[in-house]
Amino acid sequence: MKKYKVLPVVLAAFCTVLVSFFVFSFIDSNASGGTNPVNEQESNSEENNSEKSNSDENTNSKGSGGNSDISNNVQNNVNGNKADVSNDVENNVTGENADISNTIDNNLTNSNDNQIENNVTNNVEVNVNVNVENNISNNTEGSSSSSENGNNDGKDENKNDENKNNDEKNKGNNEDKGNGKNEEEGNNNKEEDRIVWGVDSANLTTEEMIACVGDNFGTPEIWGRYLGEKEGVSKGLTSDEIELLHSNDIKILLIWNHFVDARGYDNGQKQAQDAIKMAQELGVPEGVAIFADIEPDYPVDSEFIRGWFETMNESPYPPGVYGVFDAEQELYAAHEQAGKDNGDLLGNTYVWTAAPNIGVTTQKEAPEYKPEAPDNALIGGWQYGLDAQACNIDTNLFHSDVLDVVW
């Protein structure tokens, strides 16, 4: 009997050792599958229902070595009187290829006081290709947008990756931020870069003139006008014009032309001071650029441009310079030299160039945007056509960045 009692014990011990051996082998094989993780994927999907608040934080989706495929999905469903939703997603990727998809879906129902904050950050350093897709949807139903009944506010901060081309590899780790305020319909994100059509004129703007431009050329988004009257040259912008242009959804670009000699630091400084004073008297708000009009027959040097820039740059109004920025013109060389004398000048002075002169066209027939200006200049616009026979205007193309510095 003792012999047969011992035998089951021995068999059980043997089976235990055998099972342990296979489990250990399986774990070890998974742990040593490769030194570089390939196709590493992290997926987060959450659904939260709350009457008061929701807070989701998804961070550190990482990939390295070879190919990275990352997908983050966040969903919040809220039904209640108040919603406070915060979503944070951060992806850090290093490798050869990266495919990143971030999706945030916020559905808020019957909420009168909503606060939504979505933050997506993609830090990507890859050798070959990077594919990033960020989709954010905020849907609010049954909520009031009035200040008395509660605000529907949402902030979307999307940081997308761009590729920089190098000789050996493409490296994508730039941030492109877009902020949007949510209304009942959803998000209004910052407008993408585009080219807009506009005009400028030395005449007073009237309803008849706006109709003339519309009938013969197109619908301008920007209209260039002069600060103060220069006898025999240009009429000064009036308060009636400001109201008329704004009522037609046309923004005003401001021009200063009360000089005929663009030489000397003190002269540039004085012109800037006079322009600032007149702009303030007219009620021009902060952040509106003023362009110094340097005509091709004016003598010009770098000191004038530097004096204009340094004085304007310390004022509420960003500096701008208009002129024929052809490489053979003195203005071109003067602007380049001013940039060397003051390292901040090129990147902070809006250039409105009249080179090359293609000729007046309609909005539909406007040329491809190819303005001429010194290297590294902040090109804001191109006056490509001069002296239209109808309506007495010049025709322009502007980069949409200028919409931030016109009135």
Image (cartoon, helix red, strand yellow):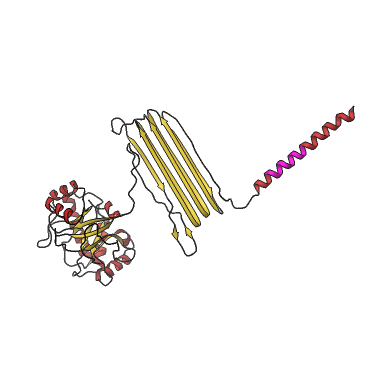
State whether residue 59 is above or below residue 348. Answer: above
Nearest to the observer: residue 197 or residue 253: 197
Q: In this orientation, does residue 311 appear?
A: no
Residue at 48% across / 52% down in the picture? 124
Count all numbered tags in the image, as a single digit. 0
Residue at 31% across / 65% down in the picture? 339
Residue 391: x, y in percent?
14, 58
Nearest to the observer: residue 389 or residue 18: 389
Nearest to the observer: residue 79 or residue 155: 79
Residue 264 found in image quarter = bottom left
State whether residue 298 is above or below residue 6. Answer: below
Residue 22: x, y in percent?
73, 42
Is 17 inside the magenta-drawn segment? yes
State whether residue 265 is above or below residue 241. Answer: below
Q: In this orientation, does residue 126 appear?
A: yes
Residue at 56% across / 54% down in the picture? 66
Residue 80: x, y in percent?
39, 28
The span picked out in magenta is 16-26
Residue 399 found in image quarter = bottom left
Nearest to the observer: residue 81 or residue 194: 194
Is 248 inside the magenta-drawn segment? no
Residue 148 found in image quarter = top left
State whether residue 104 is above or below residue 324. Answer: above
Residue 115: x, y in percent?
37, 35
